Image (cartoon, rainbow, N blue to C red):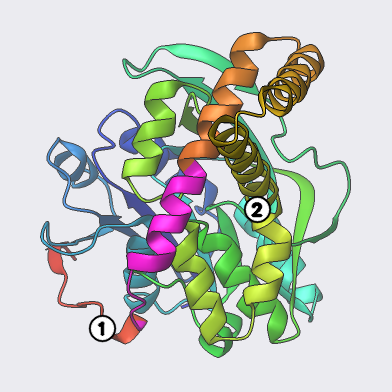
Amino acid sequence: MNFSVVIIGKNEERHIEKCLLSVLKAVSQIDLCEIVYVDSASTDRSVEIAKKYPVRIIQLKPDWPLTSSAGRYLGFVNTSGKYVFFVDGDTLIFKNWPEKAIDFLEKTEKAGGVAGIVHEIFIDEHGRFSGMKKNRYNTIKTGEVKVFGGIAVYKRSVLEKAGTFNPFIKATPELELSLRIRKEGYSLFRTPDPMAITYAPVRESIREIFRRGRSGLYSMGSTLKLCGTNGTALQYISERMGFIISFGLLLSGVIVLTFLSLVFKKYDVFALVAGIAGLMFVLISIKKKSVKSTLLSIVKRSVILYYTIKSLFFDRIKDPSQYPVDVLTVKE
């Protein structure tokens, strides 16, 4: 097998048909290609819709830990292509992308993977259009990048050497994988070729911030602990956690100084701290041109900080080999 497409999804009845049609069209000229849809125990019509198309369907069981990484992990285990294209079920793939990706990877020995331009369409909880971000990663020329999103093509040989997605990781699994790939001496590339259009929820909303927190997408403490087991923890802190560490230190400083000033009745210190905090809020609001955006940013960072600390102390790290592999085969 030369090319494997692993499509992951849970309750994607709104998008899965369009996704499958775009993938089938995109790989129509590729010989020895397989497509597998990995369903994470959907309770809607996702599987029923997918059955109509010439793709293999496997399903995770509802009592398993369900993560995007688990879908990719089991998709990798259940395919054999020389190149593996991971696709989210809410995504449309551009027709010529797979062939361009294969050509690039065959010509670039040090490449562990490649991705292209991604356009994002934002939708609300009712599926209504809410906005669009063209060229999300602002790609204008081919170059090395530190991390991909969830949609990218990898060399199977590199994933076998570095290890594929860890099925237990919920927060920043793509970065954790990329650190291992780069540690093995390979590079990741993004080209200015159109790759995908993806439908995404509006991230900067109170509802989405707390949903992502409850779902474990902000539990970076567990990812940090995993990185500590393979020697990439310092890199992970440097590349992903700088903003949350600085926010945590600032928040801690404000809380401690406020507490001490009130306990020792140093109201002038309290007034100074409050004044500095207020000035920072005003300056950030001016920069963002929105008080609402500033408030959302503070809420988001607070939620990330909470779940990062919680996962750092309470989440257990598990080896990928502990994840069950006896998937339900819905369609061969």
Residue under circle 1?
Answer: 322
Q: Is residue 35 visible?
A: no
Which residue appears farthest toward the right when viewing the image? 141
Which one is earlier in the sequence, the residue at label 1 or at label 2? 2
Q: Is residue 198 above or below residue 312?
A: above
Q: Which of 78/309 is in front?
A: 309
The secondary structure that most of the magenta stretch takes on is helix
Q: Nearer the viewer, mark 1 or mark 2?
A: 2
Under tag 1, what secondary structure?
A: helix
- Report the side of 189 relative to 13 (left or right): right
Task: Name the amino acid type tagged 1.
Answer: Gln
Inspect the image, locate mark 2, and give the three-letter code of the amino acid beneath it.
Ile
Residue found at x 76% / y 66%: 104
Residue drawn at x 50%, y 44% is 304
Disc 2 element: helix
Q: Is residue 149 magenta?
A: no
Residue 189: where, in percent of width, then height? 76, 62
The residue under the point 55% across, 76% down is 227
10 Å neighbourhood of mark 1: few (<14), some, or many (≥20)?
few
> x, y percentage for residue 191?
79, 52
Q: Give the label on residue 245, or none.
A: 2
Quadrant of the snapshot with the C terminus: bottom left
Give the numbered dot on residue 164.
none
Q: What segment carries the magenta color? A: 304-319
Q: Position of residue 123 (x, y in %)?
A: 45, 20
**Residue 305 seen in the current view:** yes
Q: For residue 242, what is the image quadrant?
A: bottom right
Asked if residue 308 lies in the magenta stretch, the reply is yes
